[in-house]
């Protein structure tokens, strides 16, 4: 049996329905559904998404039998409408519209009034008795067809329209009379001839075929491709084509067109929200050439039409059990529905509508949770750029940490901290950040770097702090010494100039832009409460300070999954003690320096453990290589030599000795602990003294010590033995017992492969997927930004593996590690602490492989909670769907 490519709807019945979105596209499936619901919909037919896919497979040729089906259904539409396509006396005109399976507003193309030519326009004049309307429709058709199908610019025709209005002394299109519009049509056709060297197509069938081709082609236009990338829509889906009999909102003052939402899409309030224009076609409402009227005024202008529209929109919302975005046309006082689809909404509205619909009995709590996409919560947790603001984008980088920030440009951590002391808002601009910049990053409102990826130092730290960050901005060159940066557009921004960062889009904007502050409603807490009921995964936070820990707990974190001790070493004058330890020539000198650090580290740990009382806190021992704590610039070396009382030559020699060709694979993590066990010993003592002091106060604390970069079980065994020895000593000294565990970070591929051996020592695994991705792919996360976009564009990779976990490779290392680890230790606690822990699709993967928890930056905790609930509920939906099949 031949494949069916065309489905008809009209006369109160349709061949499709709302369940056929994959085949008919969202718009098409809903047109079929509305027809079946006996809602007034102009008749038509849908060419399937499969036809579009085949069109591309066949090198832009229709699949066999499709055109014959189109002609059969066109004849059926002619019979239903009592008019013939191309008839000179009574012409049927049609619209040709795109319609993918998910809504892609404005991304693909539409042609209205198709079938008009120099002959059929006379039939339209005769049939309507309205010459002005006919020529208005013809000039619209030429403009749209020339833009969408022939590749001309709309501006070519808008210039002629504006000139005609000036000539006639009028302001609005509707004020042009029939003769002016007739002259305009002639000018439009002449413009086509001038630009293309051929006549505007007069054969309706040729127009029709070309329009169908153009809609198929629009699936791969640049804006559609960009939209698909932003929303993770597969390129192989294709678009459907919807052909409908035209109804006309431009017949006069008893006709019109409008767009509306069944609820307020910005605030989520339960009120009819929309606009309409009389004597207009759909494009006029969104084009801005005339000011539309608020939908509620239609109640006075056309009460019967408004009453019918009100009944229909309420019925559609009840039927679909979701807020609808509808389009309608009024032709001579008669209402027609042209579209219904699930309405796009702000994050705030999404939460409110979901919760309200549960209260109204329209949906259940599970459906409400699935109605809010996890990534939408970013908009509720951070300041955002005012959508009404006009902006001048001067560069674009990676959206490394969401939100928005405005401030004066500074080029060093010291400048940022000085700015904070003067109550100034600053943006820290660096070629790339290092751990030494931590104070300045904390002081700044936002961070901009020329280099680095989504898991670079700047990105990771900024997300942890809840700071806006644009990283890897290759559009700028930073001259820190000169106090300026230059964009590829030739714009120079100097120290003290204002810029605005959009961390959600990666845009760098010149000047100060108004921001909108986030609001968390009671509905947000209600929705998150429901999400927590359904999820299985625990959610912890990556936090390095008591403040971060409190923020995380407020956002619902159930513990700390990663506390990075090295960040604490850069606060105040602590780095001096670290440098003293590094420069010490013998063990006793290192121990003296570490003794200075001990009380500082203990105070830090005590604050974090206290903030997370009753919840587990995983503390990672020192991870970065020691050279990161030493200065690199000449003037900094000189300052440190004076401060430490050591010769500059000795200091330079030490810096040179610590230099590594590949620090990421060098002397760091557990390797430091193996060669300098006194560092691990000091940190363990600080952890357990802090825990024991709190335990004496009657507080329940649960420290979990994590040894990083383990690749061999004996590395872990050595470090664990030392930690346990110190822990037992401290607990004896304080006379209290504290529950604790010692585990490891699985971030080296060998650790995943030998996880069964490592689990003989480790009581928990935490997958450090940032480094596991680097080592699994052999990529540097700070340099990969130069070529990863090309890999994604060329289809080598579907996603940036530092943003969404690579399931086929790195994900398999994770799966192997979990299975092998639990084969040795069935009760092994397993989590993830890389940045993937806050990515919704990666959270779903963590659920599927059986992890116990994910850990992410404090401001992504709600996102992870919601994503974990989605993972469970989507599994349930799949099971139901399989049962139905």
Image (cartoon, helix red, strand yellow):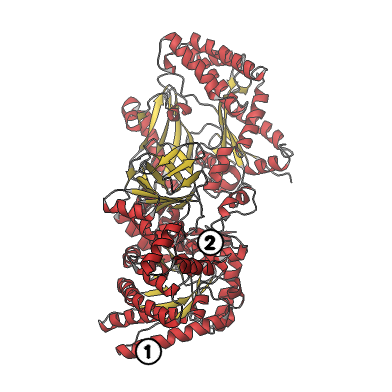
Count of number-bearing discs: 2
Element at label 1:
helix
Quadrant that contains the C terminus: bottom right
- Up the image or down, 256 lies above or below 49; here it is above
Residue 522 horizontal side relative to residue 758, left or right: left
Residue 196 appears in the rendering: yes
Pick the front one: 1 or 410: 410
- The numbered disc on residue 167 is none
Tell me residue 177's x, y (percent): 46, 11
Q: Find disc 1 in the rendering and name its residue.
A: 729
Nearest to viewer (mark 1 / mark 2): 1
Residue at horizontal 26%, vertical 82%?
698
How many neighbours does mark 2 have within 10 angstroms: few (below 14), some (14-19), or many (20 or more)? few
Pick the front one: 593 or 814: 593
Residue 87 appears in the rendering: no
How many neighbours does mark 1 have within 10 angstroms: few (below 14), some (14-19), or many (20 or more)? some
- Up the image or down, 736 lies above or below 136; here it is below
- The answer for how far apart the CA atoms under marks 1 and 2 are is 56 Å
Q: Find disc 2 in the rendering and name its residue.
A: 880
Tell me residue 179's x, y (percent): 50, 8
* Nearer-N-terminus badge (1/2): 1
Tell me residue 812's x, y (percent): 61, 68
- Up the image or down, 464 lies above or below 407; here it is below
Pick the front one: 877 or 409: 409
Tell me residue 622's x, y (percent): 45, 73
Element at label 2:
helix
């Amino acid at each position: 049996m031949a494949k069916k490519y065309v489905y008809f709807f009209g006369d109160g019945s349709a061949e499709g329905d709302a369940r056929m979105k994959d085949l008919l596209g969202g718009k098409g499936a809903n047109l079929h559904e509305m027809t079946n619901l006996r809602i007034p919909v102009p008749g038509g037919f849908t060419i399937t998404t499969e036809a579009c896919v085949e069109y591309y497979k066949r090198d832009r040729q229709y699949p066999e039998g499709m055109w014959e089906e189109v002609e059969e259904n066109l004849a059926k539409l002619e019979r239903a409408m009592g008019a013939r396509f191309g008839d000179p006396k009574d012409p049927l005109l049609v619209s040709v519209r795109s319609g993918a399976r998910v809504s892609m507003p404005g991304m693909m193309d539409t042609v209205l009034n198709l079938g008009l030519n120099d002959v059929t326009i006379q039939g339209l004049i005769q049939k309507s008795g309205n010459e002005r309307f006919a020529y208005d429709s013809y000039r619209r058709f030429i403009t749209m067809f020339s833009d969408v199908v022939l590749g001309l610019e709309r501006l070519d025709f808008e210039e002629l329209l504006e000139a005609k209005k000036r000539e006639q002394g009028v302001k609005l299109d509707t004020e042009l009379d029939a003769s002016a519009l007739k002259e305009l049509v002639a000018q439009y056709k002449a413009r086509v001839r001038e630009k293309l060297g051929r006549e505007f197509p007069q054969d309706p069938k040729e127009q029709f075929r070309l329009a169908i081709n153009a809609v198929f082609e629009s699936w791969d236009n640049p804006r559609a491709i960009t939209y698909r990338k932003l929303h993770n829509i597969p390129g192989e889906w294709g678009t459907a084509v919807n052909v409908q009999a035209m109804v006309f909102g431009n017949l006069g003052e008893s006709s019109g067109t409008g767009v509306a939402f069944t609820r307020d899409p910005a605030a989520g309030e339960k009120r009819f929200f929309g606009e309409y224009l009389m004597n207009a076609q759909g494009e006029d409402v969104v084009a801005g050439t005339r000011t539309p009227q608020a939908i509620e005024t239609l109640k006075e202008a056309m009460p019967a039409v408004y009453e019918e529209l009100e009944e229909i929109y309420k019925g559609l919302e009840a039927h679909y059990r979701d807020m609808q975005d509808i389009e309608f046309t009024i032709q001579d006082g008669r209402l027609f529905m042209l579209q219904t689809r699930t309405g796009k909404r702000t994050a705030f509205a999404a939460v409110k509508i979901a919760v309200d619909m549960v209260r109204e009995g329209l949906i259940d709590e599970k459906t409400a949770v699935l109605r809010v996409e996890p990534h939408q919560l970013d908009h509720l947790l951070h300041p955002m750029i005012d959508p009404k603001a006009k902006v001048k984008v001067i560069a674009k980088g990676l959206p490394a940490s969401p939100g928005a920030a405005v401030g004066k440009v500074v080029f060093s951590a010291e400048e940022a901290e000085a700015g904070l002391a003067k109550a100034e808002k600053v943006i820290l601009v660096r070629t790339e950040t290092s751990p030494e910049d931590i104070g300045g990053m904390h002081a700044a409102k936002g961070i901009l770097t020329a280099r680095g990826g989504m898991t670079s130092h700047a990105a990771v730290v900024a997300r942890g702090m809840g700071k806006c960050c644009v990283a890897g901005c290759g559009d700028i060159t930073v001259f820190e010494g000169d106090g300026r940066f230059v964009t590829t557009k030739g714009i120079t921004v100097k120290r003290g100039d204002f810029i605005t960062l959009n961390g959600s889009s990666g845009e760098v904007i010149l000047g100060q832009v108004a921001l909108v502050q986030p609001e968390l409603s009671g509905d947000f807490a209600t929705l998150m409460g429901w999400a927590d009921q359904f999820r299985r995964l625990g959610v912890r936070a990556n936090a390095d300070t008591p403040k971060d820990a409190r923020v995380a707990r407020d956002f619902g974190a159930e513990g700390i999954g990663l506390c990075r001790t090295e960040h604490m070493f850069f606060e105040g004058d602590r780095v001096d003690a670290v440098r003293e330890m590094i420069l010490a020539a013998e063990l006793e000198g290192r121990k003296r320096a570490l003794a200075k650090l001990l009380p500082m580290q203990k105070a830090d740990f005590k604050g974090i453990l206290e903030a997370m009382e009753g919840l587990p806190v995983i503390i990672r021992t020192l991870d970065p290589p020691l050279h990161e704590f030493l200065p690199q610039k000449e003037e900094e070396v000189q300052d440190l030599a004076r401060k430490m009382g050591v010769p500059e030559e000795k200091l330079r020699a030490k810096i040179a000795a610590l230099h590594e060709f590949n620090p990421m694979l060098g002397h760091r993590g557990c390797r430091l602990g193996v060669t300098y066990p006194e560092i691990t010993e000091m940190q363990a003592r600080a952890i357990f003294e802090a825990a024991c002091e709190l335990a004496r106060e009657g507080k329940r604390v649960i420290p979990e010590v994590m040894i990083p970069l383990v690749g061999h079980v004996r590395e872990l065994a050595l470090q664990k033995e030392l930690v346990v020895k110190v822990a037992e000593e401290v607990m004896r000294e304080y006379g209290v017992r504290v529950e604790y565990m010692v585990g490891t970070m699985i971030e080296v591929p060998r650790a995943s492969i030998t996880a069964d051996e490592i689990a003989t020592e480790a009581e928990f695994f935490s997958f450090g997927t940032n480094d596991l991705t680097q080592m699994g792919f052999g990529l540097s996360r700070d340099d990969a930004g130069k070529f990863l976009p090309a890999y994604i564009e060329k289809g080598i990779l579907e996603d940036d593996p530092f943003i969404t976990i690579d399931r086929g490779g790195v994900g398999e290392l994770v799966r192997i590690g979990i299975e092998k680890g639990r084969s040795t230790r069935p009760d092994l606690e397993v989590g993830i602490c890389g940045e993937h822990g806050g990515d919704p699709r990666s959270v779903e993967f963590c659920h599927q492989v059986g992890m116990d928890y994910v850990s992410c930056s404090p401001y992504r905790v709600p996102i992870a909670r919601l994503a974990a609930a989605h993972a469970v509920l989507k599994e349930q939906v799949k099971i139901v769907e399989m049962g139905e099949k």
